[in-house]
Structures are given as structure tokens and as C-alpha cells.
């Protein structure tokens, strides 16, 4: 039976562990965390394995066949290089690095070794993506307006941009990754950021952007905007979603929730409604009675994502992995280019 090890026994590690305990064809052999008590808790939950505070000792002792790396964004590097050196297939949580040259170096080592890898873009496995991709294939997308607005996570490293990458790189990267998944590669980004709404009184040691707005030009001609913020104190303050607009219809995409398509059904078309179109000044109004066609997320896509990687290691066939390291590298390069634009005040051309 193949042995699985996990490095990083925090919140995202526990998310993956909740999936592993249902996999009966692998051995949960080792758990590693700098805080040994957290690794010991994982051993208890798994009902097997051994706790370590040194991942190299774990590798030496249990010789894992696969590993999940669930560490903070600023901690990537040595763990990956040592894992690659030993030839261990690995799944790593996003963002894979905060330095593009580091990520590029890791990718080169992976390709030289020919390792199976996967990255934690679980949302790619959601069933709503089938409907979204079908809509996009049939309708020329002119523009996308997207947003992810939330609060400040409790882990202390998150609020420091040099450690987390900020909201866009650490969290909104899921939406940015899906933009690539749906539309192809971006060409150029221009991003601005603002601070001052979150005060030291509200959040001690806070050192990241409250809000950033990015304008994105894709190689296929589509233009998108993405707002990314962590100032929200209540879910009523903003509705996070992405709206994809075509010539005569649109699609609202809510991450991990649902997709609603308007204008496909004749009853939703604004031109069928008296007074629905204002032609004099070129402005359009939606049909106030539109209902749309709604597709709801109804699968455990996180488990599917993890299971897909495990199966790839067991069979040697990685073709069903939707986000190998080589592809995830591009999503990280995308978001880091936005951060660079925020820093320089200039547009940045995406280069992989």
C-alpha cells in the first residue's frame, strides 16, 4: 500500500486530512509540523502514522510515496527542492511561491525529474465549471467583471503582504486561476491598491492592501477587471462573483456556489420586454423579470481534487490532474504581475 505524508498541520492541512481518512487504499504514514502537538493531533484523527517536527527525518523514516505540502506562502523552497531530489510526487497548496524566479526554479527541477505534481486549485474540479465552459465556448466573451471581497483571516502571517502576497495572491488567486482556465492566457495587467480603511486599531500588525483593482487584457481580446479586498465585516457589504458578458447574454459565476446564465432563454431577453431597451443614449436595461438558468455546485470537489492526485500516483497516469505545477505556475505569475504593477504604478506584461 502506498504511503502518504503531509507537511503543515494547520487549517488547510486539516481540510485535506478530512478527505484522506476516507481513502482506504493508501496508508496515512506521517504528519509533520514545526509545532509537534499539531502533528500529533493529525495522527489521532487519522488513526495511523507518526508525528514529526522535521520533514527530512519523516522522509528518512517512512519513505513516503507521495506528500501534501500545506505551508504558508513564504515558506516554499527548500521543502520542494528536497522532495524533488528524493523523487517524491507532491501536491502543494497555492500560492506555490511569492517569488517568480523561485517558482520557475522549482518547475525546472520538477520537469527534469519527471515528477507527478498537483496544486491546490480545487475549484477547477467543481461541476459548475462544465456549464461555465460550455457557455463561454458558445458565446464570445467581451468583458468580465469580477470580485472577491472578504475579511481578514486569523492567521498572523496573512495580514503581512511580504508573507502572504496579499489578498489577490493568497485568496483571489482562485478566481484569477479560473479566468485562465476559462479564457486562456492573459497578456497585460494594470493594478492599483489602496490602504487606510483597516487601521491598527482594527487589526494589529496589519500590513497589506485593503483593496486592489486589476485591469486585465487577455490574448484573445477579452478585457477583465478584478477587485480583491479584505475589508469586509459582513457578508452584506459586497457580493463576490464574476460576470461574463457576451453580445446578447451574460453569466454570473459564484465561486464554489453556482452559475446563472441570463439571456439564453427567450423570456430573459431584454428586447422582448417593452421599455427594456433605451436606444437613444446606447444604454441597455436588463429584463426586470429575468430568471436565468441556474446550475448549482453539488459535488465535493475538494475530495475529487485530492483523489485525482492520489490516483495519478497510484496508476502513474497524471492526465486527469487539472492543475499540475506547470499550469499553477502561470496563475501565480499572473497574480505576482499584478502585485508588481501595484508597486511600480505601471502596466505589466505577463511573461512565463
Image: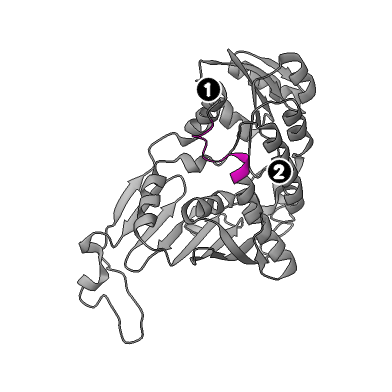
> According to the image, what is the colour scheme of the structure?
one colour
Span shown in magenta: 318-327
Which residue is under mark 2?
A: 73
**Residue 326 is covered by the magenta coloring:** yes
State the residue in front, 284 or 264: 264
Image quadrant for the C terminus? bottom right
At a point 61% along the width and 31% down the height, the residue shown is 116
Q: Where is residue 42, by image quadrant?
A: top right
Q: Is residue 79 left or right of residue 90?
A: right
Judged from the image, the secondary structure of the residue bearing numbered disc 2 is helix
Q: Is residue 112 left or right of residue 297?
A: right
Residue 48: x %, y % from top left: 62, 13
Looking at this view, name the residue that lies furthest to the bottom: 280
Answer few, some or many: residues within 10 Å of disc 2's Cα (few below 14, many 20 plus, some between 14 and 19): many
- The reply to whether discs 1 and 2 touch (Cβ–Cβ < 8 Å) is no
Task: Single out the mark in the foreground, 1 or 2.
Answer: 1
Residue 205: x %, y % from top left: 77, 52
Residue 59: x %, y % from top left: 74, 20
The label on residue 315 is: 1
Q: Where is residue 351, by image quadrant?
A: bottom right
Answer few, some or many: residues within 10 Å of disc 1's Cα (few below 14, many 20 plus, some between 14 and 19): few
At a point 55% along the width and 21% down the height, the residue shown is 314
Residue 330: x %, y % from top left: 62, 50
Amino acid at each position: 500500500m502506498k504511503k502518504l505524508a503531509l507537511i503543515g498541520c494547520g487549517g488547510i492541512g486539516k481540510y485535506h486530512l478530512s478527505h484522506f481518512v476516507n481513502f482506504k487504499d493508501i496508508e496515512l504514514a506521517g504528519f509533520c509540523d514545526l509545532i509537534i502537538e499539531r502533528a500529533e493531533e493529525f495522527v489521532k484523527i487519522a488513526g495511523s502514522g507518526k508525528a514529526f517536527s522535521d520533514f527530512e527525518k519523516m522522509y528518512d523514516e517512512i519513505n513516503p510515496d507521495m506528500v501534501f505540502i500545506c505551508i504558508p506562502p513564504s515558506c516554499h523552497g527548500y521543502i520542494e527542492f528536497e522532495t524533488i531530489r528524493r523523487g517524491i510526487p507532491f501536491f502543494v497548496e497555492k500560492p506555490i511561491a511569492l517569488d517568480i524566479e523561485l517558482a520557475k526554479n522549482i518547475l525546472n527541477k520538477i520537469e527534469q525529474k519527471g515528477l507527478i505534481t498537483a496544486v491546490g486549485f480545487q475549484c477547477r474540479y467543481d461541476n459548475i465549471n462544465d456549464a461555465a465552459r460550455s457557455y463561454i465556448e458558445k458565446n464570445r466573451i467581451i468583458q468580465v467583471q469580477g470580485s472577491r471581497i472578504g475579511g481578514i483571516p486569523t492567521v498572523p502571517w496573512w495580514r503581512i503582504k511580504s508573507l502572504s502576497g496579499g489578498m489577490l495572491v493568497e485568496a483571489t488567486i482562485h478566481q484569477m486561476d479560473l479566468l485562465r482556465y476559462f479564457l486562456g492566457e492573459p497578456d497585460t495587467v494594470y493594478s492599483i491598491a489602496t490602504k487606510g480603511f483597516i487601521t491598527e486599531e482594527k487589526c494589529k500588525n496589519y500590513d497589506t492592501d485593503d483593496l486592489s483593482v486589476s485591469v486585465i487584457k487577455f490574448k484573445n481580446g477579452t478585457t477583465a477587471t478584478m477587485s480583491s479586498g479584505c475589508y469586509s465585516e459582513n457578508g452584506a457589504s459586497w457580493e463576490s462573483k464574476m460576470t461574463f458578458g457576451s453580445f446578447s447574454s451574460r453569466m454570473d459565476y459564484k465561486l464554489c456556489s453556482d452559475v446563472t446564465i441570463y439571456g439564453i432563454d427567450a423570456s430573459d431577453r431584454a428586447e422582448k420586454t417593452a421599455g427594456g431597451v433605451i436606444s437613444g443614449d446606447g444604454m441597455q436595461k436588463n429584463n426586470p423579470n429575468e430568471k436565468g438558468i441556474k446550475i448549482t455546485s453539488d459535488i465535493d470537489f475538494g475530495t475529487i481534487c485530492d483523489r485525482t492526485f492520489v490516483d495519478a500516483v497510484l496508476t502513474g497516469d497524471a492526465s486527469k490532474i487539472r492543475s499540475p505545477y506547470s499550469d499553477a505556475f502561470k496563475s501565480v505569475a499572473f497574480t505576482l504581475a499584478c502585485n508588481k504593477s501595484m508597486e511600480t504604478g505601471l502596466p505589466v506584461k505577463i511573461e512565463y
